[in-house]
Amino acid sequence: MKLFDLSGRVAVITGGNGGIGLGMAKGMAAAGATIVVAGRDAAKNGAAVKELKDAGGQATAIPVDVLKEESCRSLIDQTVKAHGRLDILVNNAGMSIRKQPEQYTLAEWHTVLDSNLTSAFLCSHAAYPALKRRGGKIINIGSMMSIFGAPFATAYAASKGGMVQMTKSMATAWAKDNIQVNAILPGWIDTALTRRAREQVQGLHDSVLKRTPAARWGVPDDFAGIAVFLSSPASDFVTGATIAVDGGYSSLA
Ligand code: NDP
């Protein structure tokens, strides 16, 4: 089906070496995209590339630390040099430091904001010239913390709320270049990130289960379909949107 065909497209996925990023990568690779897996951990990068290739996809890895501007710029430069183009950027890398607001140091605040939000700005800024050549897609990963708050998530929620507003602003700025910019808001998904959260926040596992209408935690593979949709011609008139992939979590009063 041409609407969802990503053949010949090149996609950079920050944090594509595991969790939600790899779930999206698997869907996009199956739809024909060449995936550039961009994480810090070389072993995880290698394992993700192998998994994508073993499934019949095309993938390479470029190491990146999204906390560093030069590393973000080099990721995009290296991708365009190696593949001759860039069509899709997924700003997925992220982390959290969980504590009460009064307990954050300024350095911790910046680490969370820079990892989750400034990184997406930097990668999008670096990718813009390449994306506008043929039109392109940016997918930003928000969170339920883009719309709700939690006592342990002040910095994380600030970064993910900012992600939504940045998405809308870039969408309006770059529509003229045929670049669509959208955000996905995952519900509670079983990944390394939330395994740590469940160790740190008592009762989290059960409270999520109880509140999620689909009656389960999400899995990374739940993101394959939405990633293909937002990367493909099927979404060419969708821009500035925030789409929850949350088993109904955010719809329940
Ligand atoms: P993971 O911990 O599995 O993935 C996080 C990814 O981000 C890793 O691949 C990691 O790569 C990468 N990363 C973190 N910091 C950096 C950095 N400085 N430079 C480069 N890469 C970095 O967790 P998830 O899959 O859950 O998280 C993916 C995204 O989804 C995040 O933005 C998260 O906030 C968001 N999200 C997750 C939810 C969930 O329930 N799991 C809910 C809502 C949003 P490496 O290990 O190589 O550093």
Image (cartoon, rainbow, N blue to C red):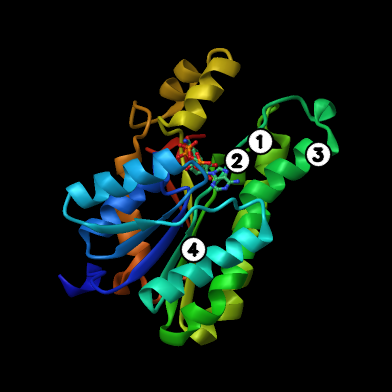
Is the residue indicated by label 2 positioned so its CB lies within 8 Å of ligand 1? yes
Q: CA distance from mark 4 to mark 3?
A: 29 Å
Where residue 212 appears, x then y in whole percent? 41, 29
Q: Earlier in the sequence, mark 1 or mark 3?
A: 3
Residue at (21% x, 57% y) in the render: 57
Q: CA distance from mark 1 to mark 2?
A: 6 Å
Q: How packed is label 4: few (under 14 Cα within 10 Å), some, or many (20 or more)?
A: many
Residue at (45% x, 36% y) in the render: 249
Q: Amino acid at mark 1?
A: Gly
Task: Read off the residue under disc 4.
Answer: 182
Q: Earlier in the sequence, mark 3 or mark 2?
A: 3
Contact, CB < 8 Å: mark 1 with mark 4? no
Looking at the rendered structure, the secondary structure element under dot 3 is: helix
Looking at the rendered structure, the secondary structure element under dot 2 is: helix
Above or below, 156 against 138 in this view is: above
Q: Earlier in the sequence, mark 1 or mark 4?
A: 1
Q: Is residue 235 visible?
A: yes
Q: Earlier in the sequence, mark 4 or mark 3?
A: 3
Q: Amino acid at mark 2?
A: Met
Residue at (25% x, 44% y) in the render: 51
Contact, CB < 8 Å: mark 1 with mark 2? yes
Asked if residue 68 lies left or right of residue 237, the reply is right
Residue at (70% x, 27% y) in the render: 151
Asked if residue 64 lies left or right of residue 49, the reply is right
Looking at the rendered structure, the secondary structure element under dot 4 is: strand
Task: Read off the residue under disc 1.
Answer: 149
Q: Amino acid at mark 4?
A: Asn
Task: Read off the residue under disc 2.
Answer: 145
